[in-house]
Amino acid sequence: MTQKRLSDSIADDIISMIVIEKRFQPGDKLPNENELSEELNISRTTLREAIRILVTNGIVEIKRGRGTFIKEDLDIDHMQHFGLLTDAKINAKDLYEMRLIFEPEAAYYATIRASDQEMKRIIDYGLQIEEKIKKKQDRTAEEQKFHQSIVKATHNEFMEKLMPVIYQAIDKGVILSVEKEVAIKDTLNDHQMIMDFMKNRNPEGARSAMKIHILHAMSELGIE
């Protein structure tokens, strides 16, 4: 698994050399195996695996006896998208497991500790998400605020420090998810359930509802 992850990460590094650093243009030859593996501080086996990933995705081609070349007809936009997705898939499982450990407990404590004003804020953001879904608009910002307002209501400063990780997971979910009817229905139902339990000050219910919500998201992203 680590080997796979490293080669994915190296594939992304080579993409960065092309897209961001502009070191290589379409049609250019990559440095030879020894040079490149030394520069990236990896084994030649890992480099070969990374090159194989890039070949599969139509980014480079191997010309027998001549070396590895950036494809002539390379679409740079596609490459930027590919780099993002590779990165997202590598991290999504770990990030969502983190959410699964962290957020149901946050919902539990927030249900007990939230002031009336904080509870109102949580419900408001939940309703804003529903509106965005119904209008088929991007709801990333509202999702973040909804989850942030729950974490804030735990009154636990260390939990708040973990919020950037949660944001990252929500963003990855948006990158990877292809909106399906069933997923949208799940999101609406799940949020409604979370809000109902919290409003009724039922911490056990809120914890279970949040767990179901994250498991639904993991299932939709294929990262169970």
Image: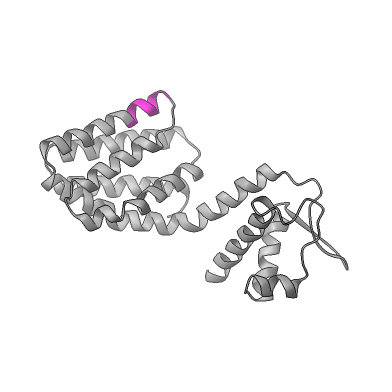
Query: For the magenta stretch, what is the residue range?
Result: 129-135
Rendered position, 202 above or below 90: above
Q: Position of residue 208 (x, y in %)?
A: 23, 49
Q: Position of residue 32 (x, y in %)?
A: 78, 70
Rendered position, 124 above or below 114: above
- Say if the magenta span includes residue 5: no
What is the residue that sits farthest to the right in this orientation?
65
**Which is the main secondary structure of the residues drawn in magenta?**
helix
Q: Position of residue 54 (x, y in %)?
A: 69, 57
What residue sits 44% from the left and 28% below the top? 137
What residue sits 17% from the left and 40% below the top? 197
How did the renderer colour the structure?
Answer: one colour
Residue 21 located left or right of residue 144: right
Q: How many marks?
A: 0
Rendered position, 68 above or below 58: below
- On-image quarter of the C terminus: bottom left
Residue 86 located left or right of residue 48: left
Tell which of 124 and 26 is nearer to you.
26
What residue sits 15% from the left and 47% below the top? 203
Residue 216 located left or right of residue 16: left
Q: Position of residue 47 (x, y in %)?
A: 67, 69
